[in-house]
Image (spheres, helix red, strand yellow):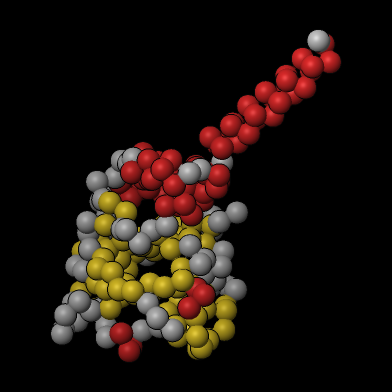
Amino acid sequence: MKKLFIPIIMAALISGLSGCNENTDPSLWSEKKTDEWFSKTAWYADWNVKPDPSVSKKEMAVAWHKNKERWQKAFSFLKETNLDTLELRRYDLDGNNLYVLVSEYQTKDENEAKFEAHRRYADIQYVAKGSEIIQITPLAMRDTITQEYDATRDIEFFTVKEHASYNADPGRFFVFFPGDAHKPGLRTGPEPQPVRKIVVKLLLD
């Protein structure tokens, strides 16, 4: 009886540990559980701006749980700061681990811009004033490299085979991971218009 009892206990322990891993490791979550987490506003500090549908739910959940403090600090800054009055400069929230770039510019024609991607940082991009088109595609759609990767700036430029276009305005934010090629700053109509852009650069460990 004792010999049978020990394997049963071991099986129960293994099953329990497996269940714990599934609860704490977002990479093991079901699609339903990932959707439930993403639909709540706690992960972006209950900010009254919504994530764009282009944001990868699974990748966001995995990255957020890997470095909660950094993501929480980023979204708390966006929520609690008057983004309309910030000076146009860099703001360090945690040195090179987490910083914010504030800029203003005129939107441009898509032929005047280039697709870009990063290897070490994730971007949270938010249009605080105005609106623009952001073209997005998986990095696998990269075609011709027009500027080799610059490690200092963590950026490379290239053309792509195909892409989708998304409208960026004060009602939504975007998150770009290293696998997301993106071309921001494009005009929404026939004429350029002014935009105020907030970009949070978050180092991925």
Q: Left or right? Give the position of 179 relative to 205.
A: left
Viewer-closest of 89 and 69: 69
Q: Which image quadrant: the C terminus?
A: bottom right
Q: Residue at x 50, y 85 (%)?
A: 143
Report whether residue 191 is seen.
yes
Give residue 74's position: percent from left, percent from top: 41, 49
Report whether residue 45 is seen.
no
Q: Residue furthest left?
A: 190
Give residue 15's position: percent from left, percent from top: 65, 29
Q: Is residue 145 above or below residue 104?
A: below
Q: Residue at x 33, y 74 (%)?
A: 164
Q: Residue at x 41, y 43 (%)?
A: 32
Q: Is residue 131 above or below residue 109?
A: above
- Tell me which corner region of the image, top left, top right, bottom left or bottom right, holds residue 130: bottom left
Q: Residue at x 79, y 16 (%)?
A: 4
Viewer-closest of 36 and 88: 36
